[in-house]
Amino acid sequence: MTEKKTAVAGEGPGTAAARRGRLRIPTLSYAVALLFLVGLVFSLGNGNFITGYNLSTIISYAVLLLLVGLGQMCAILVGGIDLSVGGVMSFVSVSFVIVVQVIGYWAYPLFILVGILVGYLNGILLTRIRIPSFIATLGTGGIFMSLAMIVAPVPVNVPTPKWGYLDIFNGTFLGISNVIFIGLLVFLLYFAILRFTAVGRNIYYVGSNIKMSWMSGINIARTRNFAFILSGTGAALAGIMVSAVQYGCNPYVGSSYILPSIAAVVVGGTALTGGTGGAFNTLFGALIMSVLQNGMNVVGVDQYFQQSILGMMIIVSVALTFDRSKTPVIK
Amino acid sequence: MKHRLTFCAVCVLLAGMLFAGQLFAAGQGEGNTAGTTLVTSIRGLDNPYHANYAVGAKALGELLKLPVDVLSTEGNSQKGISDVRAEVAKTGGNMVLSIDPNQAPDVVPIAKILEDAKVYWVNWWNKPDDVKVTTYKYWVANITFDSVGTGYFNATQLFKAFKTPGKGKIIALQGQLANNAAVGRFQGLQKALKENPDVELVQWEAGDWDRTKGYNLTKSMLVAHPDIDGIWSANDEMAMGALQALKEKGLDGKIPLTGTDGIPEIFDAIKAGYVTSTVMQDAKYQSQLGLSMALAAKSGKLNVASMPANHRSFMIPGTQVTRENVDKVVNEFIKNTPKYDLSDFFSRWVAEAP
Amino acid sequence: MTLEGGARKSVMVANGNVSGPLARAWRGLQKTGVAGQIVCLVIVMSIFAIGTRGKYLSWDNLQVILSLAGIPAILAIGVHQTIVLGGIDLSVEGVAGMCIVFVGLLLKNKLNTNDVGLWIVPVVMGAGGIAGFLNGLVITRLRIPSFISTLGLSWILAGIAVYINKATTVPLLDTQIQGIVNGSFLGIPFIALIALGLALLMQTVQDKTRFGGYVYAIGGDEQLAQQAGVRVNRIKIMVFVIAGVFYGLTALALCTQLGSAHPRTGSNILFPAITAVAVGGVALTGGIGGAKNAALGALIVTALNEGLVLMSVSPYVQQAVNGIVLIAAVALTIDRRKLGFIK
């Protein structure tokens, strides 16, 4: 109760300014601690958990969640949500598989551009047509899911002679899988945008108090469009990665990432109300989700209970990582 | 702060639970350190067909005194692939795998993972046609069912059951649109339609294998086409939904329908004369065959390199069930788990698959 | 912007300059608070009526639409309350799965000798209510956002439901409840009447009781409500309990309609329900919209889906049409004046 009161008192224009450039150590440290605790439990359960082989398994799944999660995080930070990531991933994946066979490496920038455009479309629907992001993205998600189905009525795959084009993801550099470098690169990019650019910081301001930001002259429409562009880009990158590491994909691929992408963001400590959280949170959120899923198999938790335990763990994680002092009202 | 402390406590408690469970599981493994783990990867434990893979694998594990692990993709390809790697890590590579992959493209990364880990494995159902089993040393075989034949068989049985056999209108419930089995079965229906020009497919909808959707779609299609003579459904679940919609209109038994898979309820419906036919895939046999082949390859009894190509990728028939043989099938496969003869892996071989 | 402006101008014209029975009728319609939704429903229905040359409006088809809309409407009436409160409830599928397990175990069936008859109704309501109570506790006491707490509970319950049920589909033999769910009165399906009754009941609670007022107060501004002395936590828990009760009823209706119980029966109902709520004009930011909106939204969505099938629209594009209509419907019906900033 006392905590709530202080939080209410702390809410105001000053908070947003004070937030600038400060890493939110407390919540992040809980996420890190949780990650280590879970990791420790699993490695006690089976020594093979901590082998290089298994860690690379964890990381490659985490990178996928990270790509789609970083995008989702931007939409959430600005106070919205992006449910179109599933449809976008599906559409990009299947089209990428088909197009990469024809135009080779150009498919990568092309589909990143597609992600940007889709994000912009979502942004326009929100800022110009004024449709809540939840609905707008639910709608566009359905449209792109349909498009994916039309592009590829059956699962598609990249034939063996063209596998070279996919080495951007499947190759190794200095003995380390490229996936890790790509994950790191994208992470740094999002981190830098949110931390060091004006529009990135505006995302935080708009997300934490839209009225105040509007009054202080921030271009709200541009900020929100940009956040959704970042979201679309993340989903497109994840779509490309899925196709690349699987050498093909099916048009349903994205639908299994809508809720997990949000879960990864929130488990890392980003608030769904917007304005608090960041790239580091999503990084740890993705890692926690991936470690949980992998670890339960490595230590051999019965399949029947895996989903239940995952459900319990996301509640526990959020209880630990979620910084309630920043959000006076829990919704 | 109080709730944070509580949560640390809850977290530690959970961790303890997991850990305790682990000691138990590790203890199980210790008794069979030399034992290879039999792993079966399926789509989920919530439907009878896939759950039967697990039942078959566990029965084989008991017989051979080997540990069994069941993995479930929950419809997520990347989870499925990731879980296979987790299992390799867990067992240190001392395992064999029988997998029903979530979707066809998944087999490529899985093949690469298992090639690196030197794990013998058998694949079921889905594989891109241009991916060849023979290019991999540890991929023992790809076994599938003749989906086109299945759809064709059910369609011809359905046409025979019309009031005027071979002449009438039907509606169709398709499975998940981009699924290989759904596409194949639908091709079988179209093949049968071509051979029976008097039968007209007036409408088809995608029911995503789901009973509720089958029910809703049939209800709507019956308004558009009240004069149909039969319903073709790509699986039993949707067929049961369609049957419920027919029951409400008092048309059960008057409009014949067909399914595929062999869920327990469909046999009762066949006995009662509501459903004309189904094709049963025996998942218990599937998982035992797959695991036995992989085990034989691992122990050297089956020399993978010298197997002919038509034994590396082949089809086995589903069991065609009609009113004539339904009692026999139920007795043999549903009420009892048959002791399968696994001495000849190719006893049910019917054709080479792509 | 232009689109919105145009729509508003035409409304102004109707309000100000034209008088007569038509304008009066329109004003009366607007007072109901669901004018936009009714117009939307009429547009959807007339398009299909033309597209199917009147078959869409045949009594047969209207019966089918009503009978298919009943269950989504009951579900939407449940979910929308948590959204009005400013939260969301994603536990629908897990709670429904769990309730379906109870139905399969207790209602007269082929696999065991249990037969509780109509007592199953309080059982599923209770089971759903307890699940809702858990949701409420986690949200208010542990202060976890409803999105995550309900998602977590959904996964937990779904896992347990599948574990108990072990992939068996339980054929139900009960005829009493099946008769109610599948029956009709004067040609109108019972399930639609039940949904209508529940909608009226909830709407009355929302409009006439203090509890209803508090819910809107919390949805509008939780801090303000708290400062005004509303017992926010208690109201929140109550809302989630009521929502849970509705999921229980949905689960019961779902499996008695099909005559079989399997935990996956309720596995694809969450997003359609939220879509229905949003189309009905309930703002996802909270504080706006009531049971009548939710029920009407479910009717619009069902009428749309049924029409797509009746008109033989290719299954490949049905989802896209759905998405477009969803956006268009909300663009037309959302009352932006009540929302400061769209999120």
Image (cartoon, coloured by chain):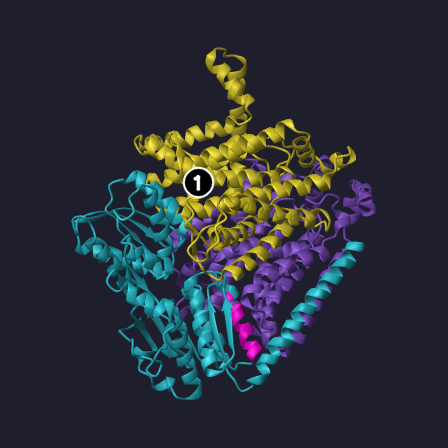
Chain colours: A purple, B cyan, C yellow
Figure quadrant of the N terminus of chain A: top right
Please check the rendered image and state whether residue C194 is part of the magenta-colored stretch, yes or no.
no
Which of the two residues, B212 or B88, is positioned nearer the viewer here? Answer: B212
Instruction: Kindly tell me whether residue C191 is visible in this rendering.
Output: yes
If the image is split into quadrants, where does the C terminus of chain A sit?
A: top right
Q: Point out the residue furthest to the bottom here.
A: B300
- B146 vs B304: above or below: above
Query: Is A21 located above or below residue B41 in the figure?
Result: above
Q: Position of residue C42 (x, y in %)?
A: 43, 28
Overall secondary structure of the magenta section: helix
Amino acid residing under circle 1: Val
Is B20 placed left or right of C193 in the picture? right
Residue C232: image quadrant is top right
Examine the structure image and report whether residue B86 is included in the region drawn in magenta.
yes
x then y, percent, for residue A271: 68, 50
Residue at 60% across, 64% down: A62
Q: Secondary structure at mark 1?
A: helix
Residue matched to label 1: C181
Where is residue B235? Give x, y as percent.
35, 57
Residue at x 46%, y 42% (from the top left corner):
C323
Q: Position of residue A203 (x, y in %)?
A: 67, 46
Please report the residue visible at 26 percent of the width from the left and 65 percent of the height from the top: B325
Magenta residues, as a range?
B80-91
> Chain for mark 1?
C
Q: Disc count in the image?
A: 1
Answer left or right for C207 relative to C249: right
Which residue is at the far top?
A: C20
